[in-house]
Structure formats: C-alpha cells, structure tokens
Image: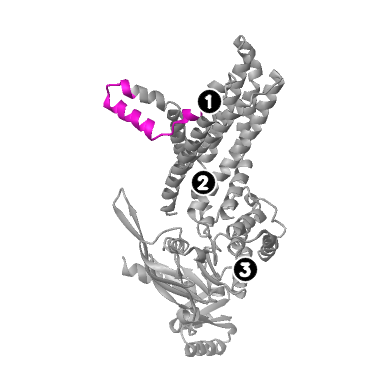
Amino acid sequence: MDVVLRTDSLTKIYKSPIAQRRVKAVDSLSIEVCRGEIFGFLGPNGAGKTTAIKMLTTLLSPTSGKASILGKPLSDMSLKSRIGFLPEQPYFYPYLSGAELLDFCAQIFGIPSAERRKKIEGLLRIVGLQESGKRRVSTYSKGMLQRIGLAQAMVNDPEFVILDEPLTGLDPVGRKDIRDVILGMKERGSTVFFSSHILPDVEMICDRVGILIGGRLISVGKLDELLSGDVESIEVTAEGLPGSELEQMEQRSQRILVSGDRAMIEVNSPDRAGEVQRAILGCGGRIVSVIPRKKTLEELFIKEIGAHREEKP
Amino acid sequence: MRTAAVIRNTFRQAVRDRVLYVLFFFGILTIGSGAVIGPLSLGEAPKISKDLALAAISIFGVLTAILIGTRLVYEEIEKKTVYLIVPKPIKRWQFLLGKYLGLMCVLALILLAMTVVLVLYVYLSEGKFQFCLLQAVLLTFFELAVVTAVATFFSTFATPVGSGIFTFAVFFVGHVTRDLRALGEISDSVAVKLFASFAYYVLPNLSNFNIRGEVVHGVSVPWSQLVYAMSYGLMYAVILLVASVLAFQRRDF
C-alpha cells in the first residue's frame, strides 16, 4: 500500500519556563496512513490530537521524531501545495465574503485568476454554500463556517486532507452534510486524516482509526478488526411475561430492563437466547424482537480509556 | 503572487476598518482647522496653516500606522487566522512582508488623500502652491515606513496594547534622539549617558524626516538630504522587518 502519511516517534514536549514543568503532549507517535483511506484520529479532549495535527501542518515544531507526507519531509514547501487543512474551530477573516475567502486561499496556492472563479463556484456548490458565497463570513452560522472551512481545504485539489474536529458543535443535519463532504473528498481521490471524538460518525465513514490517549497511540487498525465481527450480546424483547417468569430469567440473563408489560432481556450467547425465547413462548409471552449487538467504537473507546487510567492511576 | 495576495487582503482588511475612516476624518478636520486658527496668528496665517496641515498628515498617519500596525500580526495569531496561512505554500517572511506592504499601501492612500486636501487648501487660500510642501509629505511617508516596521516588529510577540505603547515610545524618543545625545554629553550620570547613547544609536532618528520647519517658509530641502533620509528610513525598516521575520519564523502557534 502507498503510504501517504508516516510519523516516526513524533514527540512534543511543552516546557513551562516559570514552573519548570514538562508536559508531554504527544509521546512517540508512530503512525501510517495509506493512500485513498479515511483515517479517524480519535481521542478524548486533551489527548494530544490537535498538537499532533499542528506538528503535521508546521504550526508547531516537534521536540523530537520525524514525519513525512507524500514521501516528503514536512519542511518541504512544495508539499504544502498538495495538502488541505481545516483547523479546529476555524476563524476566518470576518471582513471577507465566503467567495473572497476562497479566492484569497486560491491566490496563496498560486492558482491563476482564470481558474479561480470556476473553482470557487464549484467548491461553494460542493459544500452547499452557493447561495451564501457573497455574504460575509462574520454572518455565517457554525455549520456554514465548517463548510466554508472544508471548501478552503479543498481549494488546491489536495492529495492529503487534514481535518481537525470537523464535526464538533454541529447538529445532526450539519454532521451528515460534513460527513457527505468528507466522503466526497475520498471519492475525488483524496486521502483524509481527521480527528474527532464523535464516534458514531467516525464509525460510519472511517476505514481505519487510531486512538490517542494521554499523547500515546493506544490502538490502531481497521474498524472491523478493532471491533471484531463477533456478536457481543443478544437483546430479546418480549411482552406479556408473568412476574414469576421474569424472576427466573434474571438468572439466565446478563440484565433485564422492564417497562410496563414489556421486558428487554440481554443474554451473552445464541444458546442462551434460544433458551430465553423458548421460555417466553412456553409461559404464554410474545416475542417482539431479537437483536444481536456487536461491539461499538464507543465501547472500544471507553474500554481503552479505562485501561489507560488503570495503567496510570 | 503569494505576497501580493496577502498585500491585497491586508489592504482590504484596513479599508474595511472603521478606525481608518475616523482617523482620516479627524485628519481632514485638522487640516481644515487651519482656516480658523491661522487668522489668530497675527500675520503668520499661511505658515501656521501649512504647519498645522503637515503636522496633521504626520500625526494621523502615525496613529493609523500604530493602531492598525500593532494589530497586524498579533490578531492573526490571537484569532488563529494564521492557522489558515502557515500550512499553505507561503513562506513566513512572504506573509509578514505582505502584511507590512499591505498597510504601507493603505498609508500611501491616506497620505495621498490628505495631500490632495492640503494642495487644494493652500491653492485656494494663497492662489499658488509650493511644491516643497510635497517634499515634507514624501519624508512623512518614509517616517511611516519606519514606524510601521516598528509596530510590525512588536506585533510579532506583544499584545496590541503593549506594541502600541512600545511603538509610541519609540516614535516619541525617535524625535528627540539628538537632544538626548546632547543631554548625555553634558550629563555626569553614567545611566543618562548610556540611555542617551542607546537612544541615539539604536532607536530610529525620526527628526531626519521632519523638514516641516523649512518647507512652510517656502524653503526647498536639497535632494541629497531627501535621498539620505529616504535611504536611512528604508534601511531601518528593512532591518526591523528582518528582525520581525526572525521572531516570527521561530514561533510555534
């Protein structure tokens, strides 16, 4: 596989000159992102995601370690023409309209004026801002700011796009719009590296994820490998169960939730699920649904955080 | 092209800033006030009016340079717009130069507009125009080039308030460095001598750009003096911009 991003023991230590304190924000980060994939860079707040991204975009210099994108060191100026970047909670020049902002960014990429106009119209259409392109960005909503931010990250048709928390602070519709734009980037051939802690969205669009906790990469891999396809538990929902039967079922199940006449019985194996279903039918109850549950990214994430906390009490 | 994009953007930022129009309005008002103050000066009206107008051009130009210049780079960092720029294919020195030249374009426009008002005012009141007044405006532009470079330098690491105070202090002391040097020569205090030497040799000698005393009397300044002052201003501004680039180059965001 063609590796687009490679970091080798990338480390950032912040030193406080007064308190003489050293904070390791990113600790020996070694990661590879392959061409054409959407890579989710996950971690709780303060995990070091933004610091790592700032090093990749030359906003911060690493304390040690190295990184390359598209086979070139980060200091290579020609590399920057091939990268798109959306910062976390982006702030744009408030006196510019959306179209003017994109035009300014396109000028920095050295795109000739004849091409710029057509490109800007296309980008505004892709992010759904064609009606608002002439409005000043100071009048944009949070969702519109994220969308114009994504548009500026695509102005140079980048091969590699870095997005820092593009989904944070958006409503469900806004998140879906941004997810669609990110998937569109992949369709157009870009490799996408994005940080987030909105796990259901990550699960929906990422090919691979890396989990960063306390500055260290704890886990990395394909989603189906990390989450495994195995069924974790089975939820059997039934109606009309007598109280005495519920008491017996409590012994066979992991947990039972009762709401009015309806009960949800969770068991940990298909055999147990079969036993429970037979018991329900045997006592005159009615089965409403049987749902197998797989491990979610959220569960994996919480488990990893828990393990990290136990390691470092 | 990349630096030109930053120049255009900085120019657009400044001309969409209300502060600029407030300063310009007061500048024009001060030039016009010569018509009221001049007659009170017992026969010196033409001189006083011109002196006041040239001083207004200088002061309001400097205020614009300080008020906008001190926010020039700091706001880009504080409001994180620099996050959009640094990852793009533009070198940090190109960005900084673009910001500086963008503001210089705005100052050139302000000076031009105020000079047009001055020319009309003098022509209407005296029926003629002394071209030597333009020499004073030209040197004011070079003085602003130095003051803007000072503001840009401080703006790379200090807050706008701090940069404003530092820049204004440099502007003020820069106009009295010769007097300070003379004071140092006659003073017995080592501290005064050291401060006077520092001010004279390190801070810009802005009195080089002040030829208002001559031109308001209709006395042209020799071109050699103008070229010397302009070269001095240019050199000083370049040195400060190099220092600004060095400070900005190493900075983490």
| Residue A46, quarter of the rendered image | bottom left
| Residue B165, quarter of the rendered image | top left
Front one among A169 and B178 = B178
Q: Residue B75 bears which disc, if any?
A: 2
Q: Is residue B236 visible?
A: yes
Gap in Å between the C-alphas at discs 3 and 1? 61 Å
Secondary structure type for disc 2: helix
- The chain to which mark 1 is attached is B
Residue named by callout 1: B211
A109 sits to left or right of B190: right
Secondary structure type for disc 3: helix
Residue drawn at point x = 58 percent, y = 60 percent: A109
Residues at circles 2 and 1 in contact by the CB criterion of under 8 Å:
no
For badge 2, the amino acid type reads: Glu
Which mark sits nearer the N-terminus, 2 or 1? Answer: 2
Front one among A186 and B180 = B180
Query: Does B189 appear in magenta?
Result: yes
State the image coordinates of residue A99 (x, y, percent, origin top left): 67, 56
Residues at circles 3 and 2 in contact by the CB criterion of under 8 Å:
no
Q: Which residues are magenta?
A: B184-211
State the image coordinates of residue A252 (x, y, percent, origin top left): 45, 84
Quarter of the C terminus of chain B within the rendering: bottom left
Position of residue A244 relative to residue A194, above or below, is below
Q: Residue A181 bears which disc, if any?
A: 3
State the image coordinates of residue B149 (x, y, percent, origin top left): 48, 40
Position of residue B148 relative to residue B137, above or below, is below
Position of residue A86 relative to residue B128, above or below, is below
Are tags 3 and 1 found on a single chain? no
